[in-house]
Image: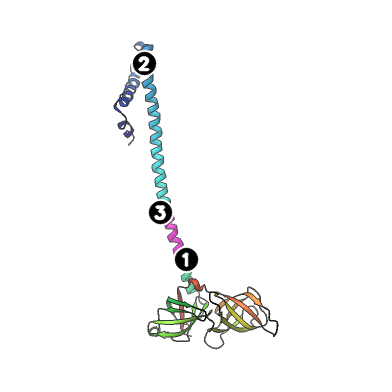
């Protein structure tokens, strides 16, 4: 590899290089001062200088080639590491998502069926999803759906291999709930406005921004103690004793991929 530069030289240049090499080699064995006159030295100076320049440039070129190859190798390693990092980040997100599925409250009596989301409907009146399991898997209308320790909604229709789930942000969904901090009970219902994935809680007298809201267990549809969301706004009523709180759901419905249906309690 290092001699390739010599082969690429023109014949006259190769002759100069060889001449310089011969003169340098002979200088080690013969006392040149006895035979070489100043005239000969002056004649040989240009090719010798050229040989030195070529040798210096050759060394620099070889070093440049080494740096170029090393730079390419490092770039390849960076590309490989970047690809591995992307895979690790994706695996980390998958791991956190699966951990969320397993972070259920300690209720050993719950029977669970995990199902994947295969469709959704979000209109002015309804906010529902379709899941890939139905009556053949023991899923029935009225069964609650969760994601980890958070409420998703409840099953409203079934077929052998598919079911429709009404989300907690659906206007038709009503959930007996309580504020965790005060233990005050009320009712959480979905939002009528399309594009607003929030809930409302009414029949409460006290609420603060940041308060967590959980299911109360009344009505025997939704199990007690599952997280619904947190208060993000409180509306003061001009007349009456009750306030209306806006609830940000704990579940990110725009990124929802699977649910867990409680088939038995």
Task: Residue 197: name its quadrant.
Answer: bottom right
User: In the rendering, at what x and y percent does residue 205 appear?
Assistant: 67, 82
Task: Residue 134: name its quadrant.
Answer: bottom left
Q: Residue at x 64, y 80 (%)?
A: 244
Quadrant location of the N terminus in the rendered image: top left
Q: Which residue is mark 3?
A: 80
Q: CA distance from mark 1 to mark 3?
A: 20 Å
Q: For the residues carrying marks 1 and 2, which lies nearer the camera in this image?
A: 2
Earlier-in-chain disc, 1 versus 2: 2
Labels 1 & 3 near each other (Cβ < 8 A): no
Most foreground residue, 74 or 204: 204
Provide the secondary structure element on which disc 2 rests. Answer: helix
Provide the secondary structure element on which disc 1 rests. Answer: helix
Q: Which residue is mark 1?
A: 93
Earlier-in-chain disc, 1 versus 3: 3
Q: Residue at x 45, y 67 (%)?
A: 94
Q: Which residue is mark 2?
A: 43
Task: Residue 190: name its quadrant.
Answer: bottom right
Q: Residue at x 40, y 31 (%)?
A: 57
Q: Residues within 10 Å of mark 2 (few under 14, many from 20)?
A: few
User: In the rendering, at what x and y percent does residue 196 appear?
Assistant: 55, 75
Q: How many marks?
A: 3
Q: CA distance from mark 1 to mark 2?
A: 76 Å
Q: Which region shows up in magenta?
A: 81-90
85 is within the stretch colored magenta: yes
Left or right side of 10 for 261 = right
User: In the rendering, at what x and y percent does residue 159 appear?
Assistant: 39, 85
Residue 96 seen by the camera: yes
């Amino acid at each position: 590899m290092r001699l390739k530069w010599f082969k690429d030289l023109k014949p006259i240049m190769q002759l100069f290089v060889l001449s310089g090499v011969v003169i340098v080699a002979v200088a080690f064995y013969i006392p040149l001062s006895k035979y070489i006159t100043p005239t000969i030295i002056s004649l040989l100076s240009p090719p010798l200088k050229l040989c030195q320049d070529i040798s210096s440039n050759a060394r620099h070129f070889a070093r440049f080639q080494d740096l170029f190859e090393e730079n390419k190798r490092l770039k390849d390693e960076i590309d490989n590491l970047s690809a591995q990092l992307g895979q690790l980040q994706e695996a980390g997100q998958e791991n956190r998502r699966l951990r969320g599925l397993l972070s259920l409250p300690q209720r050993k009596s719950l029977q669970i069926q995990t199902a994947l989301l295969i469709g959704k409907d979000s209109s002015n009146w309804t906010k529902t999803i379709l899941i890939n399991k139905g009556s053949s898997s023991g899923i029935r209308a009225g069964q609650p759906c969760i994601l980890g320790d958070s409420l998703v909604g409840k099953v409203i229709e079934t077929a052998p291999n598919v079911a429709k789930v009404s989300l907690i942000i659906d206007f038709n969904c009503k959930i007996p709930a309580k504020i965790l901090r005060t233990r005050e009970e009320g009712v959480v219902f979905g939002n009528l406005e399309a594009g607003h994935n929030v809930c409302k809680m009414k029949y409460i007298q006290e609420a603060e921004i940041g308060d967590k809201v959980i299911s109360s267990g009344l009505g025997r549809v939704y199990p007690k103690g599952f997280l619904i969301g947190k208060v993000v706004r409180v509306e003061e009523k001009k007349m009456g004793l009750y306030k209306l709180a806006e609830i940000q759901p704990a579940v990110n419905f725009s990124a929802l991929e699977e649910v867990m249906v409680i088939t038995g309690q």
